[in-house]
Amino acid sequence: MNKAIKKWLLGGALLLAFGLAAPSFAADEAPAKVEAASEVAAAPAAVAAPAAVAAPAAATPAAAAPTPNKGDTAWMMVSTLLVILMTIPGLALFYGGLVRAKNMLSILMQVFMIFAVVIVLWCMYGYSIAFTEGSAFFGGFDRLFLNGIWDPTKAAFSTAATFSKGVVLPEFVYVAFQGTFAAITCALIVGAFAERAKFTAVLAFVVIWFTFSYLPIAHMVWFWTGPDAIKDAATLATEGAKAGWIFQKGALDFAGGTVVHINAAVAGLVGSIMIGKRVGYGRESMAPHSLTMTMIGASLLWVGWFGFNAGSALEAGDIAGLAFINTLLATAAATVSWVFGEWIAKGKPSMLGGASGAVAGLVAVTPACGFVGPMGALVLGLLAGIICLWGVNGLKRLIGADDSLDVFGVHGVGGILGALLTGVFAAPQLGGQGLFDYVTNTLSADPYSIGGQVWAQAQAVGTTIIWSAVVSVVAYKLVDLVIGLRVPEEAEREGLDITSHGESAYHS
């Protein structure tokens, strides 16, 4: 195994061990952790009807179970479509324009097929493992093959919890929305080892990694049973104990800084190292073949990301509006800071820099968008543009890996930055939302601890890095032993479009 990977895994293991052993800086104990993570994506559990209230003479009838609001449902279906737009065609065109012309179709095919395969796996078992009650690390099997969502006896569909008591969504809508997150996460990975991996190896790796990295991390970060059962301190503790491991620690991740971006970036970086550098890397020109395609792809990503971020509010309300404006502002700020930083450093502003800056801003604001105020999002975007610019230049040289399309430099660095700074800018004194107390159903009266929240965020980041790295190393090794990860050198030189798919993107 590569020495660099061994060093990172050893260092990461020490970090995780320290995180598990060290006391939390936050003032609240474990029961309050659910309160701290109140705005993270809700668990898809049916919301129970309120218990009947006993009257002196006879019990009154139980209140009717909540029913989905048509406006919320419509918004979530639109958001789901927007996330699909992010992946196909958004991400596919963004990546496609960045590779050489001889590999254009190969990257399009990888993204397109990964999306399709993951959606199938999600509906078969992925949703159940990620979003049903089980342990702190894995869900159960209650929703295998989406069983149990339609009840033929009652002739009714089940519902999924949101972040407001008494507000629910049709569970099938929630399944579809979260399935698109799983699909784009897996598709992000391939940019790190573009132009040299076998198509069969890519698909095999994705199946393993989706099952053993994406699903557990999604469960750890996002799963909880919803707010309706929380009535007092006792029920807060009971419901909190059912949540995912990172959720219980109080980490905030509104739309996927850890689950999506850091998770995928680490897998991509490990893959770029284990598969090796492209033939001619550092000696031959490997410039993007179509920045026009890349600009179109980046624009589709920006538009689709409003569904990704604002849709993660799960309701068409104030928090969705906050996530919407933060996504718009942070992305614009990161574009400006990247372009001007590149302009100062290299003497010319580039379209590639503009597109990369926009994606960096989108990535960084993802975990923060529903928690921070607009000015916090502005600062986060400005920092993301400059720091991710360093990530794809200085950090990339330090690592020495051929991360073809800078997956780690943008998604890894931006995701880590956004996750950590969420703990800072969520503070009410900095314009953030603070924490929500579901016992009183109001904002928490306890003082917000920036240090404590940043520590919780750091534990989430460290856990995600280590978990994804370990799963990725094992998955790549297994695939290499059985299939082989890399195409032959002559096939790589000719291009994967012809040698792997028998097609060409362009004809003279």
Image (cartoon, helix red, strand yellow):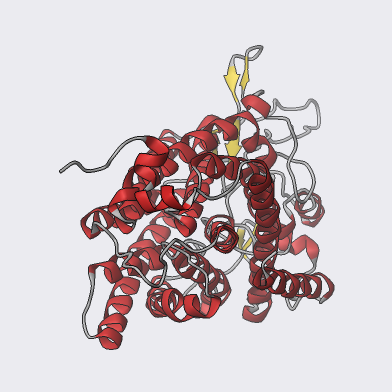
The quadrant of the rendering that contains the N terminus is: bottom right
**Above or below: residue 240 compared with residue 499:** below
Note whether 319 is above or below 88 in the view shown: below
Query: On the picture, is 481 further left or further right than 233?
Result: left
Q: Position of residue 143 (x, y in %)?
A: 67, 29
- Percent from the top left, x then y, of residue 263? 59, 58
Comparing 168 with 324, the one in front is: 324
Q: Position of residue 378 (x, y in %)?
A: 37, 75
Disc count in the image? 0
Q: Which residue is at the far left?
A: 508
Residue at figure coordinates x 74%, y 40% from the top left = 133
State which quarter of the image contains the C terminus.
Answer: top left
Depth check: 365 or 297 in front?
297
Looking at the picture, how far across and down is residue 431, in whole percent?
46, 75
Which residue is situated farthest in the right direction here?
21
Residue at 47%, 61% (x, y): give it. 366
* Image position of 217 with respect to 350: above or below: above
426 displayed left or right of 214: left
Is residue 216 shown to the viewer in this render?
Answer: no
**Residue at horizontal 77%, vertical 32%?**
55
Residue at the limit of the structure toward the front, as seen here = 490
In this rendered view, identify the residue nearer to me: 308 or 197: 197
Taking the spot 62% from the left edge, 29% from the top edge, the residue there is 124
Q: Quadrant of residue 273?
A: bottom right
Residue 22 visible at all: yes
